[in-house]
Amino acid sequence: MFERILVPVDGSDGALAALDLAVELQKKCDSELLILSVYRHYSLLEASMSMVNPERPENLDDSMREYATSIVEAAKKFAAEHGSGNMRGFVKSGPPARTIVNFAKDKSANLIVLGSRGLGDMEGYLLGSVSHKVTSLARCPTLVV
């Protein structure tokens, strides 16, 4: 039924619930699990005002990429502990909803499983949540947990 299941993760409880369900679906469908973490690219101006590493403000993207990578690794460990065998992890930079949808298209995902609430910022409250945008833009079925 579903050959490739995409699970975007951000370290939130909602993403963990989505991952748990995706692993169960993966086992039933004998699918490949694609675990994706998307981090936002920061401009040099934003980076210069960051408190992440004031000595090296140009390093904000590296910090965000490292954090996203750690989220993917933790998600892969969780999935393996819950019986997933066929999985791959990915880290991408960009606007979360569009990056998720484009990634799903590029990897021919048949299903996207994501949490209804993540660790979004104020932009999510003003413009709508990532899960809402993904369900609007995705060309494949989307399951919001």
Image (cartoon, rainbow, N blue to C red):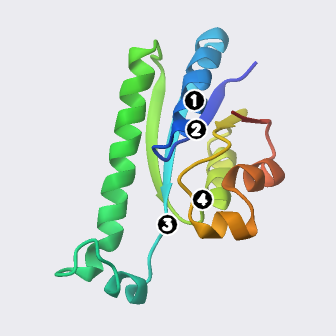
The Cα–Cα distance between marks 4 and 1, rounded to whole angstroms, is: 19 Å
Q: Where is 97 relative to 123, above or below?
A: above
Name the residue beneath numbered marker 1.
Answer: 17
Dot 4: few (<14), some (14–19), or many (≥20) neighbours within 10 Å?
Answer: many
Name the residue beneath numbered marker 3.
Answer: 40
- Numbered disc in front, either 3 or 2: 2
Give yes or no for contact between labels 4 and 1 (Cβ–Cβ under 8 Å): no
The Cα–Cα distance between marks 3 and 2, rounded to whole angstroms, is: 19 Å
Residue at image location 67% in from the left, 13% down from the top: 29
Residue at image location 61% in from the left, 36% down from the top: 6
- Numbered disc in front, either 2 or 4: 2
Q: Can you give x and y, in whole percent of width and height, for residue 50 in the image? A: 33, 79
Tell me the kind of residue under disc 4: Pro
Name the residue beneath numbered marker 2.
Answer: 14
Q: Extreme bottom residue here?
A: 45
Give yes or no for contact between labels 4 and 3 (Cβ–Cβ under 8 Å): yes
Dot 3: few (<14), some (14–19), or many (≥20) neighbours within 10 Å?
Answer: some
Tell me the kind of residue under disc 2: Gly
Marks 4 and 3, the one that precedes in the sequence: 3
**SS assignment at label 2:** helix
Give yes or no for contact between labels 2 and 4 (Cβ–Cβ under 8 Å): no
**SS assignment at label 4:** helix
Which part of the image, by quadrant, shows the N terminus? top right
Tell me the kind of residue under disc 1: Ala
Marks 4 and 1, the one that precedes in the sequence: 1
The Cα–Cα distance between marks 2 and 1, rounded to whole angstroms, is: 5 Å
